[in-house]
Amino acid sequence: MKSTSFRRWRRCAAAPLAAIAAAILTGCPSSGDGSAEAFFPENYRTAFTLVRDCRNSIEHAATVRVWVNAIGAQAYLNDANPLPVGTIVVKEQFSGAACDDDADLFLWSVMRKEEAGFDSQDGDWNWQDVSAPDRRVVVSGKTSCIGCHGRQECVERDYMCTAP
């Protein structure tokens, strides 16, 4: 039988906008209080590699683009599993139909691969949702996105749900 808090997490993790609203309004587990720092640098677009071009994402209800840091970019592009410790994956989420107007950028969903044992059950990923443009961490923790990323087809790609 699932606990109430687990059911609440599943609701919060169902979609990023729902997760953000729930984290702010109901205090979901591991919700950010704005004091945590984002896992990725402000200059990620020049420091990271674009690994997934601008596409519609049904799961994230947005137009998205994905960047990966130097530690994991080649492994991501080669579909290597698991990705190296220290990999940071940044999914930009836009409200518009394209990814060319930062005024439409409303959220970054971020995954950072931690050392083995951080969260072995869920691939040792640490997750964040960071609001744009203020870079306020609104959701952070071990399992905030696992509701979707725990699907078998994602687990087979080290919890990446989309191919490059």
Image: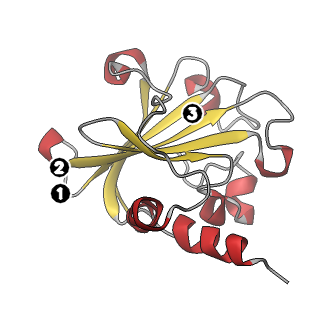
Amino acid carrying label 1: it is Gly
Closer to the camera in the image, 18 or 104 = 18
Q: Are marks 2 and 1 in contact (CB under 8 Å)?
A: yes
Q: Are marks 3 and 2 in contact (CB under 8 Å)?
A: no
Q: Horizontal placement of 109 versus 74: left or right? A: left
The residue shown at (76%, 39%) is: 124
Amino acid carrying label 2: it is Asp
The residue shown at (55%, 26%) is: 73
Q: Position of residue 140 (x, y in %)?
A: 55, 45
> Reading the chain from its start, which is encountered first: label 3 or label 1?
3
- Picture quadrant where residue 40 is located: top left
* Residue 153 visible within the image: yes
Disc 3 to disc 1, how far (Cα)?
26 Å
Between circles 2 and 1, the one closer to the viewer is 2
Would you name the residue on which mark 1 appears? 96
* Residue 52 visible within the image: no
Q: Residue furthest bottom?
A: 1
* Structural crowding at the residue carrying mark 1, measured as other residues with C-alpha within 10 Å and reported as few (<14), some (14–19) or many (≥20): some
Q: Position of residue 164 (x, y in %)?
A: 51, 43
User: Which mark, by number, is residue 104?
Assistant: 2
Closer to the camera in the image, 19 or 123 = 19
Would you name the residue on which mark 3 appears? 77
Q: Horizontal placement of 59 versus 132: left or right? A: right
Q: How is the image coloured?
A: secondary structure
* Structural crowding at the residue carrying mark 2, measured as other residues with C-alpha within 10 Å and reported as few (<14), some (14–19) or many (≥20): some
The residue shown at (17%, 39%) is: 102
